[in-house]
Image (cartoon, helix red, strand yellow):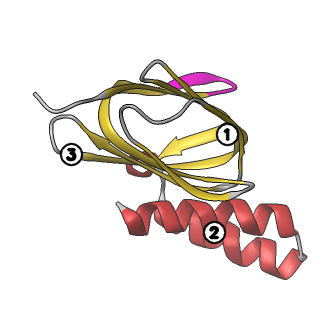
Amino acid sequence: MAAELHVELVAADRSVWSGEATLVVARTTSGDIGVMPGHQPLLGVLESGPVTIRTSEGGTVVAAVHGGFISFADNKLSLLAEIAELADEIDVQRAERALERAKSDTDAAAERRADVRLRAVAVR
């Protein structure tokens, strides 16, 4: 069996995904980071962006994450997000409408959220 780490992706309102993985890529305030089993302990601030999880079974889980924290120790990775949505849950047409609405309203935060949702679907 390949080395794996336990991942918990939690949003403020729910547990989004939990399982075993071989690699997790997330965006932090210091840049993109890849975490594999045996990584040095870390604590960081998550930026809005897609999070990619390579599962132990060889699949890929992608989520749109909007802020929060990342923590890794003892092969346990916690992603504590303000908002998180699995790419499979995202309604593309709704996200596109939200992006257009945010652009016309010049709402930078809403535009960023819609853009991250669309990027997560594209990565998937």
Sequence-first disc among 1 and 3: 3
Three-letter amino acid code of the residue under disc 2: Asp
Label 3: which residue? Answer: 59
Label 2: which residue? Answer: 115
| Residue count near mark 3 (Cα–Cα under 10 Å), binned few <14, some 14–19, many ≥20 | few
| Residue count near mark 2 (Cα–Cα under 10 Å), binned few <14, some 14–19, many ≥20 | some
Q: Tell which residue pokes out farthest to the top in this image.
A: 74
* Number of marks: 3
Residue under the point 23% across and 30% down:
3
Label 1: which residue? Answer: 83
Q: Is residue 72 magenta?
A: no
Residue 122 at x, y percent in the picture: 41, 69
Residue under the point 46% across and 18% down:
74
In space, the residues marked 1 and 3 are separated at their CA atoms by 23 Å
Residue 39 at x, y percent in the picture: 45, 36
Three-letter amino acid code of the residue under disc 1: Ile
Sequence-first disc among 1 and 2: 1
* Image quadrant assignment for residue 100: bottom right
> Which numbered dot is residue 10?
none
Q: Is residue 98 above or below residue 24?
A: below
Disc 3 on helix, strand or loop?
loop
- Badges 2 and 3: C-beta atoms under 8 Å apart? no
Q: Tell which residue pokes out farthest to the bottom in this image.
A: 104
On screen, residue 90 versus residue 81, left or right, reads left
Residue under the point 79% across and 79% down:
103
Residues 34 and 53: in front is 34
Magenta highlight range: 11-15
In space, the residues marked 2 and 3 are separated at their CA atoms by 24 Å
Three-letter amino acid code of the residue under disc 3: Gly
Foreground disc of the pair 1, 3:
3
Sequence-first disc among 2 and 3: 3
